Image: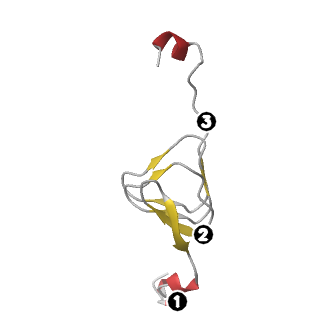
Amino acid sequence: MDALERQHGACYAKPVTIGNNVWLGANVTVNQGVTIGDNTIIGSGSVVRKSIPANVVAVGVPCRVLREITDKDLTGYMTSGLV
């Protein structure tokens, strides 16, 4: 809390790692030292305090894994002829 101690290195940030194809909803807060795995979706307003694995949907305060992303989540967009 002391400004002089912070100036001399007592307070530092740990790196945040965000994987490929991650979607963060609006107003997501990611705390220091957290890793979010590839292809993961973080719901709006979530506070990510701990690392989240790949290929999941995670939401909440604190953020927690809701479920895995599976083939059931496919919408057919890639086979619709629009791509």
Q: Amino acid at mark 1?
A: Thr
From this viewpoint, is residue 71 visible?
A: yes
Q: Position of residue 66 (x, y in %)?
A: 50, 69
**Above or below 3: residue 56:** below
Query: What residue is disc 2 on?
Result: 55
Which mark's residue is nearer the viewer, 3 or 1?
A: 3
Query: What residue do we see at 41% from left, 59% from top?
Result: 25
Image x and y of residue 81, in percent: 48, 88
**In the image: residue 37, left or right of residue 57:** right
Label 1 Cα neighbours within 10 Å, binned few <14 / some 14-19 / many ≥20: few
Residue 5: quarter of image: top right
Crowd band around label 2 with a 10 angstrom C-alpha radius: few (<14), some (14–19), many (20+): some
Kindly identify which numbered label has been placed on residue 14: 3
Q: Position of residue 15 (x, y in %)?
A: 61, 39
Q: Secondary structure at mark 3?
A: loop
Instruction: Give the left or right position of residue 77, taking residue 55 as reference.
Output: left
Residue at 63% in and 64% down: 54
Return the disc, 3 or 2, that comes first in the chain's sequence: 3
Mark closest to the chain's N terminus, 2 or 1:
2
Q: CA distance from mark 3 to mark 2?
A: 24 Å
Labelled pair 3, 1 in contact (Cβ < 8 Å): no
Mark 3 / mark 1, whichever is N-terminal: 3
Q: Amino acid at mark 2?
A: Asn
The residue that label 1 is drawn on is 79
